[in-house]
Amino acid sequence: MLHYSEIGPQDAPIVLIAHGLYGSGRNWGVIAKRLSDTRRVVTVDMRNHGASFWADSHSYHDLAADLATVIDHLGAPVDVIGHSMGGKAAMVLAVTRPDSVRRLIVGDIAPVRYSHSQIQYIEAMQAVDLSVVTRRSEANAQLAALGVEPALCSFLTQSLDVSAKRWRYNLDVLAAEMPDIIGFPELEGSFDGPVLFLSGGTSDYVLPEHRAKIRGLFPKSRFAKLPKAGHWLHADDARGFEGSVRAYLDADAAQDLT
């Protein structure tokens, strides 16, 4: 089963957060702590990331099944927040295992194939000479010299085990599976529960032309933007992201009681 952490009252409604490519549950610590005043927040490490297991495959059906196993262990259904790769996994989960998802929030991603690969960051990490790295700042410097922007250098090295001199990513498998990661599987059926597609105002990941595909899979979907945020909306505007998530879940929960 996936490695996960949790915070908040044990008897509170559960929110599970699935991170994006090259992320980990710890990247969501600030959001998890803020939401934990009224919810039991569970942050997972997806397969081939963080402290979770490594596997030879990284398909969205696999990722969705991993999430379903955690949710079955916690007690379904739960609210699910998925960002980027985690958002695609959460969408597949909702369609294939609708009994496991109460409400879904998808962070800045659509159920479509994208043309931009993220392979360059794998190549940069593989090029870092970890034998001479004694602190994260040294790895940051090497990544920057390879052309990785400063903010992303710091993000990537959060998943560097300096003492063991290894990345907490299964880089070889992620590279091999990149065509599937930037794609999206064909799905039969739909998820009839509430779904919020929350996008960054300066991001181009969720476009008007994606809405027909989105509504075909998620007929009750709603759309909102954080004007000042990009793709990493939970980091670019943590307060705005938290407020949008809280308002959506609270309003929808109130409707359940009427």
Image: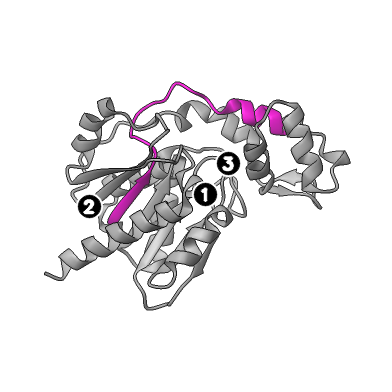
Q: Nearer the viewer, mark 2 or mark 1?
A: 2
Q: Is residue 248 left or right of residue 136?
A: left
Residue 188 appears anywhere in the view: no
Of helix, strand and loop, which one carries label 3? loop
Vertical order, 66 against 55 (above or below): below
Q: Is residue 68 visible?
A: yes
| Mark 1, secondary structure of its residue | loop
State the separation of the CA atoms marked 2 and 1: 24 Å
Q: Mark 3 or mark 2, which has the lower sequence index?
A: 3
Mark 3 to mark 1 CA distance (whole Å): 10 Å
Residue to which mark 1 is pinned: 46
Q: Evaluate if marks 2 and 1 touch, with contact meaning CB atoms under 8 Å apart.
A: no
Q: Is residue 74 left or right of residue 122?
A: left
Q: Position of residue 239 (x, y in %)?
A: 44, 56
Using the image as rendered, state which of residue 28 and residue 160 is in the foreground: 28
- Front of the two marks 3 and 1: 3
The magenta segment is 102-125
Q: Which residue is mark 3?
A: 22
| Residue bearing mark 2 | 194
Q: Is residue 115 magenta?
A: yes
The three-letter amino acid code for the residue at tag 2 is Pro
User: Residue 117, relative to residue 85: is it above or below?
Assistant: above
For the view shown, which residue lies furthest in the top direction? 115
Name the residue type under label 1. Met
Badge 3 density bin: few <14, some 14–19, many ≥20, Cα 10 Å: many
Q: Secondary structure at mark 2?
A: loop
Task: Find residue 237 and report its horizontal and vertical position in percent.
Answer: 47, 48
For mark 1, does the 10 Å Cα neighbourhood hold few (<14), some (14 to 19), or many (20 or more) residues? Answer: many
Front-lying residue, 202 or 130: 202
